[in-house]
Every structure is written in C-alpha cells, then in structure tokens.
Image (tube, coloured by chain):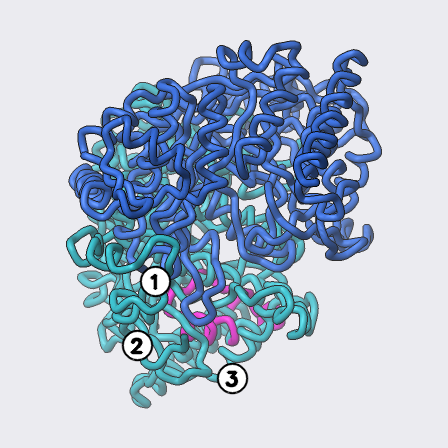
Chain colours: A cyan, B blue
Amino acid sequence: MRRKSQRRGGRQRDPAAIPQLPWRQVVNPYRPLEFLSEDQVEAIHQASLKLLENIGIEFMSPRALSVLSEAGADVDRDGQLVRFDRALVQELAARAPSSFTLTPRNPERRITVGGNVVCYSTVGGPPNVHDCERGRRAGNLKDYTDFIRLAQSLNIVHYIGNQPCPPVELPAEDRHLDCYLAAITYCDRVFQCTAIGAERAIDGIDMMAIARGLSRDEAIASPGILTNINCNSPRRYDGAMCEGLMAMADYGQGVVVTPFTLMGAMTPVTVAAALTQQNAEALAGIALTQAIRPGTPVVYGGFTSNVDMRSGAPAFGTPENARATIAGGQLARRYGLPYRSSNANASNVVDAQAAYESEMSIWSAVMGGANLLYHGVGWLEGGLTASFEKFVLDAELLQMFSEMLRPIEVNEATLALDAIEAVQPGGHFFGSPHTLERYETAFYQPLLSDWRNYETWEEAGSPTATERATAIWKQLLKEYEQPPLDPAVAEELEAFVRRRKDDIKRQAA
Amino acid sequence: MRRKSQRRGGRQRDPAAIPQLPWRQVVNPYRPLEFLSEDQVEAIHQASLKLLENIGIEFMSPRALSVLSEAGADVDRDGQLVRFDRALVQELAARAPSSFTLTPRNPERRITVGGNVVCYSTVGGPPNVHDCERGRRAGNLKDYTDFIRLAQSLNIVHYIGNQPCPPVELPAEDRHLDCYLAAITYCDRVFQCTAIGAERAIDGIDMMAIARGLSRDEAIASPGILTNINCNSPRRYDGAMCEGLMAMADYGQGVVVTPFTLMGAMTPVTVAAALTQQNAEALAGIALTQAIRPGTPVVYGGFTSNVDMRSGAPAFGTPENARATIAGGQLARRYGLPYRSSNANASNVVDAQAAYESEMSIWSAVMGGANLLYHGVGWLEGGLTASFEKFVLDAELLQMFSEMLRPIEVNEATLALDAIEAVQPGGHFFGSPHTLERYETAFYQPLLSDWRNYETWEEAGSPTATERATAIWKQLLKEYEQPPLDPAVAEELEAFVRRRKDDIKRQAA
C-alpha cells in the first residue's frame, strides 16, 4: 500500500521528500500531571515566601536595587540583598500576563506562550557542536547557520534558542549581531536574544523590529523576541542578567526567568528544598520584570535537576529531574504564569541514553504543563554540545509527542461498527472501505523510525537511528529553502549590524 | 564525593557490584492520565455492547460455547458465534475481582495485580534472541535460562513472561515443561505459563503448586501463576486459547485477556473503532473466565497499536499506540478490572529508536494506569527478538520510572530553609551538613546511564549505552546467585517433568 497523494495538510507532495507534520501550534488538551498535593504546593509556596522575606535574593545591579526599593522591597543598604514582603512579591507577580504572543518577521509563525499551548525551541548555548561525519568541534558561524537552516526546515521547531552553538571564532563583544542576522536571514521564526547586559538585548529587539518594519517603541505593543535570564543560584542575579532582564522589560519583550538549580550543587539535595529555592528565585526575578514594566510578558522557568554526587557532574532526564519538572508546573500554574522546561540529557553520544533521558524530559515537561520546551531539539552532553543527529532525533520525539496529544475523535464514523461487522472473525481490515478512505492519514508517518523487517533492514546496511539521522539532516540542509525577506529590510539589517559593530569597537577603544 | 556505605535499603555493599534498586512493589500514587472524556468512554462502552449484542464474537471451542450458552449468551447454532446481552456481559465481568495477589515459590516475591500497583515482566514469546557479541539466533534453552537468571538478578523484574525466548530446538509438544522447570529452578518469582490448550496450562499450575508444596486444588485458594490469552482479532478466540483460558479459570489462576488489535490490520484504522473492538473482545473473554468460575482473577489486556500502512509491518511506541494505551486504561477502570499493557518497540537494534519507542510505551502504560507491564524488559524488533542488551536498557528505564513515582516528601527537613540560608548567594551546597547527611541516597544511582564528562568517557573508549549494556548483562550473569530450592521439591518437579514427557509421548504415539 503506497501513499498516492498528500498527507494531512502541509505535507510534501514529493515522494522523496522527508515526511513531516505541518507547522502548527501544539496544544496539550489534557489535565497536567500533578505530583504535589494542594497542601504540598502551598507548603512550598509558603516556604519560598519565607525565604524571600527573611533570607533574601542578591541583585548585583544598582538599577535593579533602586527599582526594587522603589517598588517597596527591603534593600540591604550595605549590600545587594533584597528581601520581599510576601504581599509585595505576589502583587508584583500578579501583574504578569497569563499568556502572550510573540510575532516574528513571518506573522504566520506567531507563537502563543501560555495556556495549553506548548512551543519547542532549538538548543541554545552549547560551546561545542557535533555530527557523526565531522566529529566534535567548537561552535562556529557555519554550523550555527546550518542549525538555523535546519530549524527553518522542520515544522516542529517553533522558535530558535539563544545561539544553538555560539560562533566562538567571532569576537565575543559583537558576535551576537552576526547570530541575530543569521537567525533572521535564514529563518522566519521567533528567536531568542542574548541578554548578557542591556546592549545585546536591545540589539536583538532592534533587529526584530527592523525585520518587521517596526520601530523599537512600536514593538512594545507587539512583542516579538524572547530571552532567558538565569538566576545564578543560589540566590543571586548577577549584573549582566539584571541589566538584560531590565532592558527586555523596558521594551515589553518576553523574559523567561530560570533559576539554575541543580540539586546537590546549587540547592540542597531534597526536591522540596530545590523547588522552594527555585520558586523564590523565580518569583524575585519575575517581580523585577513587573516592577520595571507592569504586564511585561514573563515565563516561570524551571531547571531543577540533580548532579551526580560522586563526581558533581550534572545529570538530566533523571527521576529527580522529572519529579521537579512536574511539580514546577504546579507552582507556575499557582501564579497563573506560563511555564518553561527543557528537553535535556547528559549522554555524550546520540544513543539510547540520549533518547531515554530526553523522553523523560519531554514527558515530564509537556505532561507537566510546560508552555516552552527550551532546548527542544539538538541538546547533547548536558548542554555542552549541539548535535546535528540529536536535532533530527528530537524532531522525531517531538512530532510523535505532538501527534499523541491530538484529541481522540469518537463519533459514528470513527467507532465504525459497520466496518467491524463487515470483516469476518479472523479476517483483516487492509481492504476495508473504511480503511481505504483513511489509511493515508490515519497514522503518524515517522521522520526517523525504521519499521522495515529485520532482513530488509539488514540488507540496507543495518542502519541505527543515529546513522539514519545523519542522512536526514544532510538531506534537510540540501533541500533547505531560504524564506523570502524584503531586500530593503535585509539591507537595513546589514547596515544596522555594521553600525553597531563600529559603535562597539569605538566603545572598546 | 564517594559512596562510603550502603545506599537505600537492599543495595549491595560491594562497591564493584552493579547498583540497583531493592525489590519492591511499585506504586503509582498519581491520578492516571485520561485522553477520553467521560462521554467518550461511555460511547465506546456502548458501541462495544452493541458489537457484543448484534455482531458477536467467535469461540472455536465446544466447551466454551456450551458454558456461554448455559450462562445465557446467544450461541449461533450453525456456527461458533456468540452474542451477549448487554446486561449479561456486564454481570459476568462484574464477578471478577478488582485486584488479586499471585504467590510464587518465594512468598516474599508475591505480587499484587490491581489497584495502583504496577508489575513489570520479562519479554515473552520472541522466536529469536540477540546479543551484541553473538548476534541473532533462534531461541534456545541456554539463552532462555540466561534470561531467567537475569530476571532473578534484577530486582525491578516482578515476574517472568511466557517464555522469554522459546527453546525451539526442543519438541514443541513438551518444551513448556523444560521452560517451567527452568523458570522455577533459576528464579523464585511468578512466571507465566503457556495456555495453548488446557494441558500446558495445567502443567504450569501443577508445577507452581509443587514448588509451593500445594496440591492443584489447594492452589485454587492461593493463585500463583498467570497466563496471557490473545483474542485472534478480529472477533475470534481460537480453540487452543479457549481451552487454555478455561483450564486456568477451572483452577482459579490468573488470566490476562488481550485482544491482538493492530489498527489497520486486525481493526479499522481509527482509534475509537480499535478501542471498541478491543473492549468487546476483552469483555467477551473476561465473561468466559467468570462463567467458568466466578471470581477468577482476570486482567483486561490492551495491545492496540498500529501497522505501517505502506508495508503492513507492526509498529509500537507510536503516537496511536500511546493514545490507545491511555484510553484503554480508562476502559479497564470503568469495569473495575486490573489493566495490562506492554513495553514494546519495533526497532531492529538496541538504539535510540528502541529507547524512545519503549519510553512512549512505558509512559503511556504506567501513567495510563497499567497494573501489568508485559514485555517489561528485553523485547526488541516488534517482538520477534529477545535482546540481552534491551533487557538491561529496559531495567534502567523501569528503575528510573519507578523512582520518579516515589512521592515527593514535603516537610520542614526537606524544605530545608535553614540549609538554604546557610549558603551564601552564588555559593554551593556540596559541603552543607544537610547535603552530607543525605547525599548517598538522595538521588537515583543509574544502572546504565553514563554521566562522565566527555573527555573521561572518550578515554574509556566512548562506549554507547548499548555497549555498556553488554558489559552489564555479562556481569549480572557472572554474579548470578541461584535462589535456594528444597532438594525434595526440585526432585519432585523433575519427576513431574519426566512423567509428563512420557505421557505426552504416549499420547502422540
């Protein structure tokens, strides 16, 4: 039985083309998993309020300290420690929207952040890159651009993470401009900017605005870019993160506030303590966004995993990671905030471990109510490497997961008693009219999975999933189509980059 | 930081020993996932009652037809088709217990089937066996016995599936006796017997009873063995399955009734139709168990996956499989019956695909409320191969999953505000007294996952998870300890096998 025509809307007609799902916003229509009782959520909430009131969070930025002080927080005059009255922090957090949209240069690729929508991003941040043909190497602009192209080629990727592999051959002070330019040129989707300091964030906002024909101020009313702000856990927002956060809030752009809480290292070893600390740190960062600009689109980030206590090495997709992820979703929902989690793993290679740790991450995140799945495709080696094969593997995992979430249709046509009656006991349904009408679109068609029988698979060279992934990313890059961009806009972006590089050189001189 | 002493109860003191969780019944304390609304469950229930009333199920056994007729079902006099009044089938199904226990020769390895307990079994049935050193070969008694030894060595395996790899070098008519003997000799846990006809089932019951010092009749009050009965879908219970089912019910032993419903082949392509057919077929088989002996311990089995419509090849761990698994749990719970699902995948090799399809199976099954996860460890290649490496991989997946399900403790000691306060902003918790008191048991210690950094892992030869699994099953077999068995019982079992083999030869002559 061969496919004769186009599958569910948006699939390619070319029979040689790689099958994939159409672009769509993925909805999780089901009640999220809950691993904490209501009482337990309340106990963690109360403990984190106590932490904020009595112990405090450090903000290493004079402006942040001044803004929070003005908002009513108690700033330690000799230091940088901020204590929040419990009413104050909740009042500030309550100013944030429960969901928002981000509009990239192609408005058809607009994403909703919140509600029961879940968006998947590329990996962001690894210093290294790997593929099975060329091996492991330092991040660079060529590979960075290829990851952007792959993201554009895969409909399941909703947005670009912060620098899939930072191009470390470029000067640290202005490489973000090359990254933004490539993200906008080769992909028409939302991208995350780097918020290490205000300037990098504002450059991202400006370039997003130029790409959309808006001024920086016009973009306030229509946010189009996102960043991730890590709390340098325990209990510290460093200066660069504070400035980046505040710049994004100044212009009403999306901020994800993510405490970096690896249990055993940056928090106590118990899940309850880690969640308490995560919650207090997240609320403090969220409060700052709302003290700057009420209504700033902000996301509650959870990144609570554990370290290997024998070596101190971070671990991901662990049982403790999954428990904290699911519980973290309950906390985010308690405050009516969108929730960010990750697709992470600690494997050194794209193997069974990479797959099962990622599945543990994806299931706990999405069934735990995550709205953003950061590092959705391509993360390997605890985040130290962006992998081309993992990019393809993850696209398959996320497609499968998203198909699974589609509601089951129950009606006379799908219950199909007549079709059942028409086949004799012990018979089969291959030739049933009910089957023939539906077989082309009835089931998910995999991107990577190989269902050939053993003999056929062996004759084809016994390729593993990882080996097949190599062929797929190569084909995707070969077939990549650059999304159209108005040449005037392209020129304006290039001119912006030239001007800003000159500014930055001048400042450094 | 090195482990100095024993981890959570039952872990080995020997630092070289393979770390694993202690034996325990795994409880899923959380509300099961629900992919169907109450109305949808009701619609499928009603459609399956219509199917049972109007379309009917074939039972290819005179005794089954007679028993069902006596119970009040409408047996087509010209054929073998049985139609069930909707009240009758529900009344019969309602006789089944909502949970039961099975007691093997070691009463400490007793398992509960039902409630919120989930039990994991070995794979059962593949004609082939594979490991990475010796390749793929036909099932045989040596490998069979090694799988039994591995099951005994791994605390996460709660029971033995029906013949992890049938020893096809032995005569088909009496190899079940060798299998039972090896299962009892090398493992002290519950094992599944083969219910292809009454004799194989009764041999299993007798040997289970001998191993426990019980008579066949005494075992009725204390069931100790389980079987799986497949409906030969669509709508047919063949003669051997009927006889096997009835023999088990005669002696009050555990029966899992599992329609073999691959969408597109044995059912229509729609999930709603497949569930309707599965539900009708399961209820019909369950009704037969209760017509034979009210209160027979019986399990609602779900095995609804799909085929690849291009080739007809079965697929597992697919989005459709996961949706049907979760919905199937809702149906089983509607009738107050324990639920059986599977850990299945269609990969030809222990690679990323094997891992992600298995994770899809495990998550949907266990979070969908499954009580028995059949083929829990070792299934590969759509069930055509039992794999040594997959056995180890699955043990890791199931251990991780079970650890994740442990409730999160929230109390003053775990919230640990004092410990949080004692570490300065930006500091770390490695040396915190709260950490030092707990670090040895705080986190799951993996069986297979490798969290070494890239350089150390590379120096160790860059082993993939599959390569590491080879080393682990070899070490487990080397360190295997045979569970003690009273020599008199061993002799009685051997005598039983000799006598039965003679009977079978005489019958055949």
Q: Label 1 amino acid?
A: Phe
Circle 1 SS class: loop
Tell me the amino acid under the disc marked 3.
Answer: Lys
* Pointer 2 residue: A211
Label 2 or label 1, whichever comes before in sequence order: 2
Q: Which mark is residue A429?
A: 1
Between tags 3 and 2, which lies in front? Answer: 3
Q: Residues within 10 Å of mark 3 (few under 14, many from 20)?
A: few
Taken as a whole, is the magenta stretch helix, strand or loop? loop
Q: Residue at x 25, y 70 (%)?
A: A437
Q: Is residue A155 magenta?
A: yes
Q: Which residues are magenta?
A: A146-174
Residue A155 picture quarter:
bottom left
Q: CA distance from mark 2 to mark 1?
A: 52 Å
**Tag 3 residue:** A478
Q: Nearer the viewer, residue A357 or B380?
A: B380
Image coordinates for residue B78, horizontal then vertical, percent: 28, 47
Q: Of tags 3 and 1, which is closer to the observer?
A: 1
